[in-house]
Structure formats: structure tokens, C-alpha cells
Image: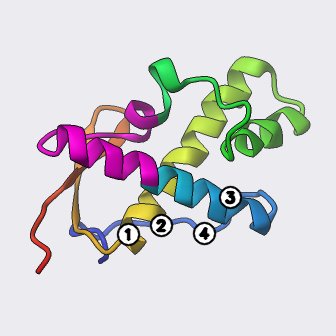
Amino acid sequence: MPLLNKSKLRYDFGIDPIDLPPIKYFLQGAVYCWIKNRKDEVFAARDLMGGENFEWAGTPLYCLYEKHINKGKDVESAIDEAGKDLGWILKSVLDEDKRSFKTYDKGMTKGYKWIGNEA
């Protein structure tokens, strides 16, 4: 079901197309875990893959960081830009999901909340 609030989506993330499906599956799993444990709370990409989940090595997300390192960015900039890429990918994952999500402004990032109105 598409996001309930219409907004811009991106489809080109500058990575090998073979790397995108594992990232999307990984994120969808994180979203479903969030919904199971915190279903009435708004979340953003940084809630799912930041903080104690900050270390992306060994996950499908690492290629997002590597993309920016390979472009010559310093570590801090690469982390920041990879996080932005992740936010855009999360948005597309939620737009393609069978569940309904509402978009919220969560400061500098987009926040999402599962509505739970599926039949």
C-alpha cells in the first residue's frame, strides 16, 4: 500500500542494482520488529539503524557507506550521506509494503507510523 501522505520517492541510489533488494528486505524486517514492539510510536531510519545499530559492517547496508567512501568522502561525511540514502530507501520500502504508513515530520528526518487499518 502506498504511503498515506503523498510525497517524492527516489529510485536511483547510486549502488549496484543487485545490492538494493537485500537492503530493502533488511529494512522491512527492522520495520516489522519496530511495529511488533513499538507499534504506536513514530520511527525514522535513524531509529532503526542508528544508535546501537550504528555498525553496518556485515549487513547489506554497508554498500551505502562504501559508495561514499569510494567517492572520496571522509568517514563522517560518508556516514551522513549513507544515512540519507537509507532514509530514501526506507521511504520506498514503506511505500511498497502491504501495510499502511503515515508520514510525520520528525525534525530533520521523515518519521513514519503504522496505521494498522489493513483489511
Q: Is residue 93 left or right of residue 97?
A: right
- For disc 2, the marked residue is 9
Q: Is residue 8 above or below residue 113?
A: below
- The reply to whether the C-beta atoms of the residues labelled 4 and 3 are less than 8 Å apart is yes
- Who comes first in sequence, dot 1 or dot 4? 4
2 and 1 marks in contact (CB < 8 Å): yes
Mark earlier in primary sequence (2, 1): 2
The span from disc 2 to disc 1 (Cα, nearest Å) is 9 Å
Decide whether residue 35 is among the magenta residues: yes
Q: Mark 1 to mark 3: distance in Å?
A: 16 Å
- Residue 50 is labelled as none
On the image, numbered disc 3 is attached to which residue? 13
The figure's colour scheme reads rainbow
Q: Contact (CB < 8 A) between labels 2 and 4? A: yes
Q: Is residue 98 magenta?
A: no
> Which secondary structure lies at badge 3?
loop
Dot 2: within a 10 Å radius of its alpha carbon, few (fewer than 14), some, or many (20 or more) residues? few
Magenta-highlighted residues? 29-48
Q: As displayed, is residue 118 above or below residue 72?
A: below
Give the CA separation, mark 2 to mark 4.
7 Å
Q: Which residue is under mark 1?
A: 95
- Residue 65, by quadrant, is top right
Q: Which residue is mark 4?
A: 11
Q: Is residue 119 above or below residue 84?
A: below
Please state which amino acid type lies under the numbered disc 2: Leu
Measured from the top left, where is residue 49 in percent x and y? 49, 33
Residue 14, given in percent of the width and then of the height, sits at 76, 57
Label 2 sits on a secondary structure element that is loop
> Label 1 vs label 4: CA separation?
12 Å
